[in-house]
Amino acid sequence: MRNNNGGGATSIVRLRHTATTVRTCHGVRDGTQFACLSNTHEPATAIRLDGRRLSWTTTTILTFVLALAIRLVFLFVASNNTTDAWSRLQSAVLWLQHPFQLPPATSAAAWLPLHFWLLGIVLWITQSLWATRVLSVLLGATTVVVLSALVSQAFSRRAAVVSAVLFTCFGLHVAFSVTTSSEAPTIFFIALGLYTWVRYFFERTPRWLVASAVSFSAASLIRFEAWLCAPVLSVMLLDFSGSWKSAWSNRRAWKHTLSFGFLASAGSTGWLLFSFLKWGDALRLPHHTMWLNLHFQPVHHSLIFRLLAVPGVLLISLSPLVVGLACIGLARVFKDGSLAARTITILVCVLCAFNIWNSVRYEVTQACYTLLYSLLLFPRA
């Protein structure tokens, strides 16, 4: 077995029971192909590609079918009325009439453009308003599969199955994945970016680097919260095996960090440059959003309400049991978890802190903002 700290893949022919966490296992021995299961709490085990491998695939397919079925049911009984869903759809319709211009909600309001382009493309192909909601349904159901794969890599397969089932039935996500709101595609791209980042973290191959960078760039062109992901994940690619000394001295790790940071920030950096050239203000849309939040609030809430809004939404949407177990798990991961699991935990904390800051400073207290990170609480519960 070979393991290059800070930048190399791990290879193995056959892996027996061990307490070491190994992520990439390939090999053929005596004509039999082997794969590797990774787990930070249980010993990693080599298994044949039949048997248990088929069971994992079957479980994933059944979870996807269940997630899709639940969302299709609510697609027919629910209206397209979650927060800004209808406004976004109308803006996409207007953009389709002038496809070489920015969407109206981008040029005249404060919303990033990619979601309108996706809705517009679907409308152009199908000529159906229903199809735009079906896009959200498909992305929502696929997110369950991506989350399962992510948790399997960073935590364990047992946690992956439980997380997938819980997220499949997560009412708040179901509600937003049957409308044309921006939450479903944003969550999908963030989850896909995290999964491919974890694969890149362990394997350091260009395909996972590009896949993760494209995913986060796409998410960054839908919602501003996704802009926080690339800096956090870039820093965590440094070599912390020898504390800060190795983090500063490992040049290969710095290469991976800078490569990922540059590519994953391409969407946000490109938009900043475009905004500056077009409007003379690189942060025009965030500035416009902040101004609207400060000056057009129909009701101004007390500081206590704004402080408790985010924890309250999490308790109501996830249940006190899940939130309590997740908090315990988040605390334990810094002691027992792998670096990949710790990275996800740190990202959850950053996104949650940003959510609380927006609630306190700008009175942005809508429940949907917790969706962007609440799915990552299930593995710790």
Image (tube, rainbow, N blue to C red):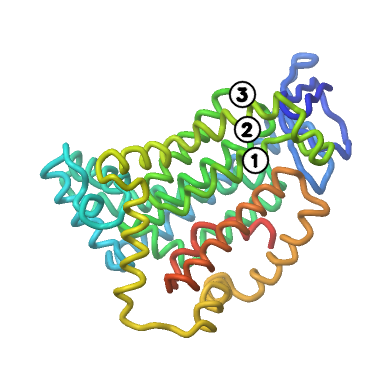
Image depth: mark 3 or mark 1 in front: 1
Q: Residues within 10 Å of mark 1 (few under 14, many from 20)?
A: some
Q: Residue at x 39, y 62 (%)?
A: 176
Task: Where is residue 337? Give x, y as percent.
Answer: 78, 49
Above or below, 306 against 231 in this view is: below
**Disc number placed over residue 37 in the picture, else none:** none
| Mark 3 or 2, closer to the camera | 2
Residue at numbered disc 1:
235
Mark 3–mark 2 Cα distance, whole angstroms, equals 13 Å
Which residue position is annotated with label 3? 205
On screen, residue 258 above or below 309: above
N-term-proximal mark, 3 vs 2: 3
Residue closest to the far left = 97
Quadrant placement of the C terminus: bottom right
Residue depicted at x 59% and y 37%: 197
Position of 260 with respect to 364 (left or right) is right
Query: What amino acid is labelled 1 in the image?
Result: Val
For the N terminus, which image quadrant?
top right
Disc 2 to disc 1: CB gap under 8 Å: yes
Residue type at the position of mark 3: Thr
Q: Classify 10 Å Cα crowding around label 3: few (below 14), some (14-19), many (20 and above).
A: some
**Mark 2 nearby-residue class (10 Å; few <14, some 14–19, many ≥20):** many
Task: Tell me which numbered mark, 3 or 1, is placed earlier along the sequence.
Answer: 3
